[in-house]
Image: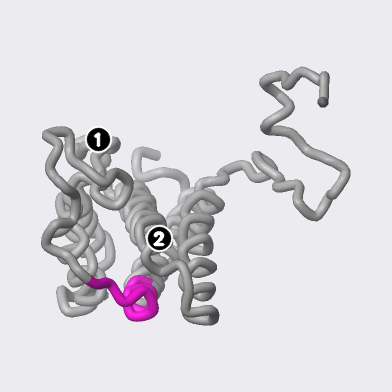
Amino acid sequence: MDNEKDTPSSLLTNDTDWHNNACLNYMPDHSTAYTEGYRRAADILIHHINETGRNQDFLVYPIVFLYRHHIELLIKQTIKSALLLTAEPSKYTYKKDSHDLNALWLFARKRIMEVDERYKPSDFKKIDDVVSELHKVDGSATDFRYARHKDGTRSLETLSYINTRRFGERMQAASDVLDGIDEGLCYLIDLDNEMYAQCGTPEG
């Protein structure tokens, strides 16, 4: 019997098999690691099902949750980027801790079109569609995490099947569009910063 007592730090620490040591907090802003991490985890699980034809009835729950959370984080990142391009970001308020994809995306969509006139409503269709479907079945981001609601009723009672390969393809497509939008906004932010560095802020 191992007499060594676990300490709180022994669970979340490194070990000699270096290839299993994940590095944290090595970037000034590690939000991308969170956002991308949820997506990659979902993709790995989807690939496993597609290659083996096994475990789909168990893995479907983390797959949908992981991708839903990925999209939520990406929308919130896009909101942050869009607000940095507005003249008065403080006049725009939204619930930063909300898990309501519909409300978050509606807010993000409006801000994006205000700060980048190249976009038109049809550019957002892939995102609109997945946000609408996810919100319809899991508006509070709990149904793929818990088997029952607080009142004891079953979660996801209206669903019988989810094709994980198809789900992954649609989520990847929406994620790619949203990621491209955020990259475009970040580029505009960099241009603004360069201009202000050369000419000063609008206030002088």
Label the magenta part by its dominant secondary structure.
Answer: helix
Q: Mark 1 points at which residue?
A: 90
Residue at image coords 71%, 45%: 23
Q: Quick check: 4 above or below 128? A: above
The residue closer to the viewer here, 153 or 124, is: 153
Location of the C terminus (image quadrant): top left
Q: How crowded is mark 2: few (under 14 residues within 10 Å), some or many (20 or more)?
A: few
Element carrying mark 2: helix
Q: Is residue 175 left or right of residue 199?
A: left
**Residue 10: x %, y % from top left:** 73, 27
In the rendering, which numbered label is found on residue 58? 2
**Residue 24: x %, y % from top left:** 66, 42
**Residue 43: x %, y % from top left:** 49, 69
Tell which circle, 1 or 2, labels the residue nearer the N-terminal end: 2
Residue at image coords 54%, 68%: 44
The residue closer to the viewer here, 166 or 1, is: 1
The answer to which quarter of the image holds residue 6 is top right
Location of the N terminus (image quadrant): top right
169 within the magenta span: yes
Q: What residue type is labelled 1?
A: Ser
Residue at image coords 47%, 49%: 196
Q: How many numbered discs sit on the rendered protein?
A: 2
Q: In this view, does 3 lie to the left or right of 82?
A: right
Residue 126 seen anywhere in this rendered image of the structure: yes
Q: In this view, does 163 lie to the left or right of 102?
A: right
Q: Give the range drawn in magenta.
A: 161-171
Q: What residue type is labelled 2?
A: Phe
Element carrying mark 1: helix
Residue 78 seen anywhere in this rendered image of the structure: no
Residue at image coords 52%, 63%: 40
**Residue 114: x %, y % from top left:** 20, 60
